[in-house]
Image (cartoon, rainbow, N blue to C red):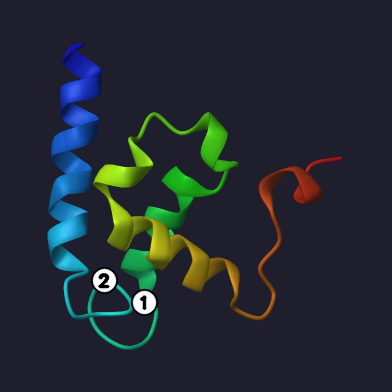
Amino acid sequence: AFFRARVDAAFAVVEAQLDGRDFLTGDAPTIADISLQGYLHYPPAEWPLDHARFPRVMAWRDRFAAMAGYAPAYALLP
């Protein structure tokens, strides 16, 4: 419960930050987006997030995955 609350609080901040933006700091990805991707790289079924509560985060994740060169986590593992 302690960690769930921390995750929810952190992603509430990200959700608010994405209001009116495609990426964390504007219209193009930055190192901040790459860093966030590390937390969301695995399939959504494995995330500790309520997807409905964070629609901007989910849309962000889809935009990130649509970028050239992106590969799903398990496609990168041997």
Of marks 1 and 2, the one in the foreground: 2
Mark 1 residue element: loop
> Going by the picture, which residue comes out furthest to the right?
78
Q: Residues within 10 Å of mark 1 (few under 14, many from 20)?
A: few
Q: Classify residue 16 by image quadrant.
A: bottom left
* Labels 1 and 2 touching (C-beta < 8 A): yes
Q: Secondary structure at mark 2?
A: loop
Foreground pick, 76 / 17: 17
Q: Name the amino acid, label 1.
A: Thr
- The residue located at (54%, 48%) in the rendering is 41
Q: Position of residue 10 (x, y in %)?
A: 18, 42
- Residue 70 lies left or right of residue 30; in this view the side is right
Q: Residue furthest front?
A: 52
The structure residue drawn at horizontal position 22% and vertical position 78%, both measured from the top left corner, is: 25
Q: What amino acid type is highlighted by mark number 2? A: Leu
Q: Which disc number belongs to residue 30? A: 1
Image point (60%, 74%), residue name: 66
Dot 2: within a 10 Å radius of its alpha carbon, few (fewer than 14), some, or many (20 or more) residues?
many
* In the image, residue 60 above or below residue 28: above
Q: Is residue 48 left or right of residue 53?
A: right
Disc sitting over residue 13 in the figure: none
Give the tally of numbered discs: 2
Quadrant of the image for the C terminus? Answer: top right
- Name which of mark 1 and mark 2 comes first in the sequence: 2
Distance, label 1 to label 2, CA atoms, is 8 Å
Position of 73 with respect to 34 (left or right) is: right
* Placement of the N terminus among the 4 image quadrants: top left
Where is 77 relative to 6, above or below? below
Determine which of the numbered discs, if any, sits on residue 24 in the image.
Answer: 2
Residue 46, horizontal then vertical, whole percent: 54, 30
